[in-house]
Amino acid sequence: MSKGQVHLLRQILGAGGDTSDLPIAHIRRNFDRLLSRFPALDDVDGRPVEVPGLPDPARAEWIDARLDRSRPAPRSLLYLHGGGFVIGSLDSHRGLIARLSRAADARCLGLEYRKAPEHPFPAALEDALVAWRFLVQDSVVEAGGSEAMAMAMAGDSAGGGLAVVTAAHLRRRGESLPAALICLSPWTDYAGTTPSVDRHTSLDPVVQRPGLEKMAAHYLAGRDPWDPQLCPLTIELTGLPPMLIHAGGSEALLDDAVRLHQRAAQADVPAELEIWPDMIHAWHLFAGRLDEGDQALEAAGQWLQRQLAS
Protein backbone atom coordinates (compact mmCIF):
# COMPACT_ATOMS: atom_id res chain seq x y z
CA MET A 1 0.00 0.00 0.00
CA SER A 2 1.28 3.46 -0.89
CA LYS A 3 0.89 4.97 2.60
CA GLY A 4 3.16 7.87 1.73
CA GLN A 5 0.96 8.80 -1.21
CA VAL A 6 -2.19 8.61 0.91
CA HIS A 7 -0.61 10.72 3.65
CA LEU A 8 0.43 13.40 1.16
CA LEU A 9 -3.01 13.33 -0.42
CA ARG A 10 -4.65 13.85 2.97
CA GLN A 11 -2.40 16.86 3.56
CA ILE A 12 -3.21 18.40 0.18
CA LEU A 13 -6.95 17.86 0.44
CA GLY A 14 -7.18 18.94 4.07
CA ALA A 15 -5.11 22.12 3.67
CA GLY A 16 -8.10 24.27 2.75
CA GLY A 17 -10.19 23.34 5.80
CA ASP A 18 -13.98 23.47 5.72
CA THR A 19 -15.07 25.29 2.55
CA SER A 20 -18.79 24.48 2.73
CA ASP A 21 -19.70 28.11 3.55
CA LEU A 22 -18.10 29.47 0.36
CA PRO A 23 -20.30 30.43 -2.60
CA ILE A 24 -21.23 27.34 -4.62
CA ALA A 25 -19.71 28.73 -7.83
CA HIS A 26 -16.42 29.17 -5.97
CA ILE A 27 -16.52 25.61 -4.57
CA ARG A 28 -17.22 24.24 -8.06
CA ARG A 29 -14.27 26.09 -9.58
CA ASN A 30 -11.94 24.98 -6.80
CA PHE A 31 -13.01 21.35 -7.17
CA ASP A 32 -12.39 21.33 -10.93
CA ARG A 33 -9.07 23.15 -10.46
CA LEU A 34 -7.89 20.69 -7.81
CA LEU A 35 -8.58 17.62 -9.92
CA SER A 36 -6.97 19.16 -12.99
CA ARG A 37 -3.66 18.82 -11.11
CA PHE A 38 -3.75 15.04 -11.44
CA PRO A 39 -2.11 13.59 -14.57
CA ALA A 40 -4.38 12.78 -17.48
CA LEU A 41 -3.92 9.88 -19.89
CA ASP A 42 -2.30 10.53 -23.23
CA ASP A 43 -4.06 9.70 -26.47
CA VAL A 44 -7.72 10.02 -25.49
CA ASP A 45 -10.51 10.79 -27.95
CA GLY A 46 -12.93 13.21 -26.38
CA ARG A 47 -15.67 15.08 -28.17
CA PRO A 48 -18.88 16.82 -27.10
CA VAL A 49 -22.07 15.12 -28.22
CA GLU A 50 -25.51 16.60 -28.56
CA VAL A 51 -28.00 14.37 -26.78
CA PRO A 52 -31.58 15.07 -27.93
CA GLY A 53 -33.78 16.04 -25.01
CA LEU A 54 -30.92 16.87 -22.67
CA PRO A 55 -31.70 20.34 -21.24
CA ASP A 56 -29.22 23.13 -20.58
CA PRO A 57 -26.91 23.33 -18.77
CA ALA A 58 -26.44 19.56 -18.87
CA ARG A 59 -23.90 18.32 -21.39
CA ALA A 60 -22.37 15.06 -22.54
CA GLU A 61 -19.12 13.93 -24.08
CA TRP A 62 -17.78 10.80 -25.72
CA ILE A 63 -14.58 9.74 -23.97
CA ASP A 64 -12.72 6.88 -25.62
CA ALA A 65 -9.31 5.80 -24.34
CA ARG A 66 -9.28 2.26 -25.73
CA LEU A 67 -5.84 1.17 -26.82
CA ASP A 68 -7.15 -0.05 -30.17
CA ARG A 69 -9.66 2.39 -31.61
CA SER A 70 -9.28 1.08 -35.15
CA ARG A 71 -12.06 -1.43 -34.43
CA PRO A 72 -15.60 -0.77 -33.24
CA ALA A 73 -16.01 -0.55 -29.48
CA PRO A 74 -17.15 -3.89 -28.02
CA ARG A 75 -19.04 -2.20 -25.18
CA SER A 76 -20.43 1.16 -24.06
CA LEU A 77 -20.59 2.76 -20.64
CA LEU A 78 -22.60 5.69 -19.26
CA TYR A 79 -20.66 7.48 -16.53
CA LEU A 80 -22.32 9.68 -13.89
CA HIS A 81 -19.92 11.94 -11.99
CA GLY A 82 -19.89 12.54 -8.24
CA GLY A 83 -19.86 15.74 -6.26
CA GLY A 84 -22.91 15.57 -4.01
CA PHE A 85 -25.22 16.60 -6.88
CA VAL A 86 -23.86 20.13 -6.34
CA ILE A 87 -20.29 20.14 -7.68
CA GLY A 88 -18.37 17.98 -10.14
CA SER A 89 -18.32 18.07 -13.91
CA LEU A 90 -16.86 16.47 -17.00
CA ASP A 91 -13.80 18.63 -16.40
CA SER A 92 -13.25 17.20 -12.92
CA HIS A 93 -13.94 13.59 -13.92
CA ARG A 94 -12.59 13.31 -17.46
CA GLY A 95 -9.38 11.66 -16.25
CA LEU A 96 -11.22 9.04 -14.19
CA ILE A 97 -13.60 8.27 -17.05
CA ALA A 98 -10.72 7.92 -19.51
CA ARG A 99 -8.90 5.47 -17.25
CA LEU A 100 -12.05 3.41 -16.80
CA SER A 101 -12.59 3.48 -20.57
CA ARG A 102 -9.12 2.05 -21.11
CA ALA A 103 -9.41 -0.58 -18.39
CA ALA A 104 -12.85 -1.72 -19.57
CA ASP A 105 -12.00 -1.48 -23.29
CA ALA A 106 -15.19 0.56 -23.63
CA ARG A 107 -16.26 3.85 -25.13
CA CYS A 108 -17.78 6.04 -22.42
CA LEU A 109 -20.53 8.61 -22.53
CA GLY A 110 -19.74 11.04 -19.75
CA LEU A 111 -22.76 12.99 -18.52
CA GLU A 112 -22.63 16.31 -16.72
CA TYR A 113 -26.18 16.43 -15.39
CA ARG A 114 -27.94 19.50 -14.04
CA LYS A 115 -26.88 20.25 -10.47
CA ALA A 116 -28.51 21.47 -7.29
CA PRO A 117 -29.44 23.89 -5.82
CA GLU A 118 -30.41 25.38 -9.17
CA HIS A 119 -31.76 22.00 -10.29
CA PRO A 120 -32.68 19.71 -7.35
CA PHE A 121 -34.15 16.22 -7.64
CA PRO A 122 -35.37 14.91 -10.06
CA ALA A 123 -33.19 16.87 -12.53
CA ALA A 124 -30.12 14.61 -12.31
CA LEU A 125 -32.27 11.48 -12.62
CA GLU A 126 -34.14 12.89 -15.62
CA ASP A 127 -30.85 13.73 -17.34
CA ALA A 128 -29.43 10.27 -16.62
CA LEU A 129 -32.52 8.63 -18.12
CA VAL A 130 -32.24 10.78 -21.26
CA ALA A 131 -28.54 9.98 -21.62
CA TRP A 132 -29.12 6.25 -21.12
CA ARG A 133 -31.83 6.12 -23.79
CA PHE A 134 -29.51 7.95 -26.16
CA LEU A 135 -26.72 5.46 -25.43
CA VAL A 136 -29.06 2.52 -26.11
CA GLN A 137 -30.14 3.95 -29.46
CA ASP A 138 -26.61 4.89 -30.46
CA SER A 139 -25.28 1.47 -29.46
CA VAL A 140 -27.75 -0.22 -31.80
CA VAL A 141 -26.43 1.91 -34.67
CA GLU A 142 -22.82 1.34 -33.62
CA ALA A 143 -23.37 -2.41 -33.46
CA GLY A 144 -24.79 -2.34 -36.98
CA GLY A 145 -27.80 -4.45 -36.21
CA SER A 146 -31.09 -4.68 -34.39
CA GLU A 147 -29.52 -5.24 -30.98
CA ALA A 148 -27.30 -2.88 -29.04
CA MET A 149 -23.76 -3.72 -27.99
CA ALA A 150 -23.15 -4.60 -24.34
CA MET A 151 -23.80 -1.57 -22.14
CA ALA A 152 -23.20 -0.69 -18.51
CA MET A 153 -23.56 2.23 -16.14
CA ALA A 154 -21.10 3.56 -13.58
CA GLY A 155 -20.60 6.46 -11.22
CA ASP A 156 -18.74 7.65 -8.16
CA SER A 157 -20.12 9.11 -4.92
CA ALA A 158 -23.43 10.81 -5.76
CA GLY A 159 -23.08 9.41 -9.28
CA GLY A 160 -22.76 5.88 -7.88
CA GLY A 161 -26.02 6.19 -6.01
CA LEU A 162 -27.62 7.85 -9.03
CA ALA A 163 -26.61 4.91 -11.24
CA VAL A 164 -28.52 2.54 -8.94
CA VAL A 165 -31.60 4.78 -8.83
CA THR A 166 -31.53 5.30 -12.61
CA ALA A 167 -31.35 1.55 -13.24
CA ALA A 168 -34.23 0.96 -10.83
CA HIS A 169 -36.39 3.50 -12.65
CA LEU A 170 -35.54 1.87 -15.99
CA ARG A 171 -36.53 -1.54 -14.64
CA ARG A 172 -39.80 -0.16 -13.26
CA ARG A 173 -40.64 1.32 -16.66
CA GLY A 174 -39.75 -1.84 -18.55
CA GLU A 175 -36.88 -0.21 -20.45
CA SER A 176 -33.51 -1.64 -21.45
CA LEU A 177 -31.29 -2.14 -18.43
CA PRO A 178 -27.53 -1.88 -18.17
CA ALA A 179 -25.87 -5.27 -18.05
CA ALA A 180 -23.79 -4.22 -15.04
CA LEU A 181 -23.43 -1.39 -12.53
CA ILE A 182 -20.23 0.01 -11.05
CA CYS A 183 -20.58 2.10 -7.90
CA LEU A 184 -17.37 3.77 -6.71
CA SER A 185 -17.65 5.07 -3.13
CA PRO A 186 -21.41 5.47 -3.58
CA TRP A 187 -23.38 8.04 -1.56
CA THR A 188 -26.61 6.30 -0.62
CA ASP A 189 -27.83 7.85 2.67
CA TYR A 190 -29.08 11.41 2.21
CA ALA A 191 -30.46 11.56 5.76
CA GLY A 192 -26.97 11.69 7.29
CA THR A 193 -27.36 8.59 9.48
CA THR A 194 -24.20 6.93 8.16
CA PRO A 195 -22.01 6.11 11.23
CA SER A 196 -18.72 6.19 9.31
CA VAL A 197 -19.17 9.91 8.48
CA ASP A 198 -18.36 10.69 12.11
CA ARG A 199 -16.19 7.65 12.81
CA HIS A 200 -13.80 8.57 9.97
CA THR A 201 -13.95 12.36 10.25
CA SER A 202 -10.23 12.59 10.99
CA LEU A 203 -9.29 10.11 8.25
CA ASP A 204 -11.21 11.37 5.21
CA PRO A 205 -10.56 14.97 4.09
CA VAL A 206 -12.86 14.61 1.07
CA VAL A 207 -16.21 14.22 2.86
CA GLN A 208 -17.12 15.97 6.11
CA ARG A 209 -20.56 16.17 7.72
CA PRO A 210 -21.20 19.95 7.30
CA GLY A 211 -20.65 19.87 3.55
CA LEU A 212 -22.51 16.58 3.15
CA GLU A 213 -25.58 17.89 4.95
CA LYS A 214 -25.66 21.06 2.85
CA MET A 215 -25.38 19.09 -0.37
CA ALA A 216 -28.20 16.78 0.71
CA ALA A 217 -30.40 19.78 1.55
CA HIS A 218 -29.69 21.37 -1.85
CA TYR A 219 -30.48 18.13 -3.68
CA LEU A 220 -33.59 17.17 -1.73
CA ALA A 221 -35.11 20.67 -1.61
CA GLY A 222 -37.47 19.61 1.16
CA ARG A 223 -38.11 16.03 0.02
CA ASP A 224 -37.95 13.06 2.37
CA PRO A 225 -34.38 11.69 2.20
CA TRP A 226 -35.82 8.15 2.39
CA ASP A 227 -38.20 8.70 -0.54
CA PRO A 228 -38.06 5.41 -2.52
CA GLN A 229 -38.13 7.41 -5.74
CA LEU A 230 -34.68 8.84 -5.03
CA CYS A 231 -32.92 6.95 -2.22
CA PRO A 232 -30.66 4.03 -3.24
CA LEU A 233 -31.30 2.36 0.14
CA THR A 234 -35.11 2.34 -0.12
CA ILE A 235 -35.78 2.09 -3.86
CA GLU A 236 -36.75 -1.40 -5.09
CA LEU A 237 -33.59 -3.16 -6.30
CA THR A 238 -35.10 -6.48 -7.37
CA GLY A 239 -34.22 -7.32 -10.95
CA LEU A 240 -31.18 -5.08 -11.20
CA PRO A 241 -28.01 -6.36 -12.91
CA PRO A 242 -24.77 -7.44 -11.20
CA MET A 243 -23.19 -4.66 -9.19
CA LEU A 244 -19.59 -3.87 -8.22
CA ILE A 245 -19.23 -1.62 -5.19
CA HIS A 246 -15.91 -0.04 -4.21
CA ALA A 247 -15.35 1.59 -0.82
CA GLY A 248 -12.31 2.93 0.99
CA GLY A 249 -11.51 1.50 4.39
CA SER A 250 -10.99 5.00 5.79
CA GLU A 251 -13.66 6.87 3.87
CA ALA A 252 -16.57 8.73 5.38
CA LEU A 253 -19.11 6.91 3.23
CA LEU A 254 -17.84 3.39 3.92
CA ASP A 255 -21.11 2.42 5.61
CA ASP A 256 -23.12 3.80 2.67
CA ALA A 257 -21.41 1.22 0.48
CA VAL A 258 -21.84 -1.58 3.03
CA ARG A 259 -25.55 -0.84 3.38
CA LEU A 260 -26.04 -0.76 -0.39
CA HIS A 261 -24.37 -4.15 -0.60
CA GLN A 262 -26.69 -5.48 2.11
CA ARG A 263 -29.76 -4.09 0.32
CA ALA A 264 -28.64 -5.69 -2.94
CA ALA A 265 -28.25 -9.06 -1.21
CA GLN A 266 -31.76 -8.77 0.27
CA ALA A 267 -33.09 -8.15 -3.25
CA ASP A 268 -31.12 -11.12 -4.70
CA VAL A 269 -29.01 -8.78 -6.83
CA PRO A 270 -25.51 -10.21 -7.46
CA ALA A 271 -23.23 -7.66 -5.81
CA GLU A 272 -19.53 -7.61 -4.97
CA LEU A 273 -18.22 -5.24 -2.29
CA GLU A 274 -14.51 -4.46 -2.35
CA ILE A 275 -13.15 -2.47 0.59
CA TRP A 276 -9.74 -1.01 -0.15
CA PRO A 277 -7.69 -0.57 3.05
CA ASP A 278 -6.81 2.98 4.12
CA MET A 279 -8.41 4.57 1.05
CA ILE A 280 -10.38 7.81 1.33
CA HIS A 281 -13.58 8.77 -0.45
CA ALA A 282 -13.51 8.39 -4.25
CA TRP A 283 -9.76 7.75 -4.29
CA HIS A 284 -10.17 6.74 -7.93
CA LEU A 285 -10.13 10.46 -8.79
CA PHE A 286 -6.51 10.66 -7.74
CA ALA A 287 -5.20 8.03 -10.15
CA GLY A 288 -1.94 9.11 -11.68
CA ARG A 289 -0.61 10.17 -8.27
CA LEU A 290 -2.11 7.42 -6.12
CA ASP A 291 -1.24 3.85 -7.04
CA GLU A 292 -4.46 2.45 -5.58
CA GLY A 293 -6.45 4.85 -7.74
CA ASP A 294 -4.97 3.30 -10.87
CA GLN A 295 -5.30 -0.22 -9.47
CA ALA A 296 -8.94 0.24 -8.48
CA LEU A 297 -9.96 1.55 -11.89
CA GLU A 298 -8.07 -1.26 -13.60
CA ALA A 299 -9.84 -3.79 -11.38
CA ALA A 300 -13.24 -2.22 -12.09
CA GLY A 301 -12.57 -2.29 -15.82
CA GLN A 302 -11.55 -5.93 -15.74
CA TRP A 303 -14.66 -6.79 -13.71
CA LEU A 304 -16.81 -5.03 -16.30
CA GLN A 305 -15.19 -6.90 -19.16
CA ARG A 306 -15.91 -10.22 -17.41
CA GLN A 307 -19.53 -9.26 -16.72
CA LEU A 308 -20.27 -8.08 -20.24
CA ALA A 309 -18.52 -11.06 -21.81
CA SER A 310 -20.97 -13.35 -20.02
Image (spheres, grey):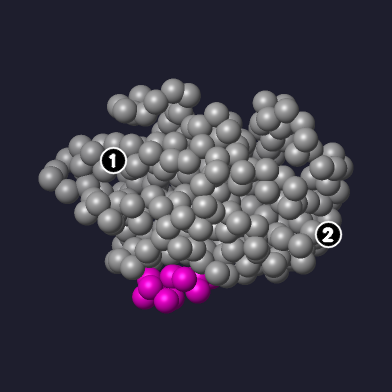
Q: Is residue 138 left or right of residue 144?
A: right
Residue at 58% x, 33% y: name it. Answer: 117
The type of residue carrying mark 2 is: Ser
Quadrant (top left/top right/bottom left/bottom right) for the C terminus: bottom left
Q: Is residue 202 above or below residue 97?
A: below
Span of residues in magenta: 261-273
- Residue 180 among those drawn in magenta: no
The x, y position of residue 230, in whole percent, is: 45, 51
Which one is earlier in the sequence, the residue at label 2 or at label 1?
A: 1
Please tell me in which quadrant of the rendered image residue 222 appears. top right
CA neighbours of label 2 inside 10 A, class few (<14), some (14 to 19), many (20+) = some
- Is there any visible trace of residue 187 in the rendered image? no
Q: Is residue 160 left or right of residue 143?
A: right
Residue at 37% x, 29% y: name it. Answer: 54
Mark 2 vs 1: CB contact within 8 A: no
Q: Which residue is mark 2?
A: 202
The x, y position of residue 193, in whole percent, is: 65, 63
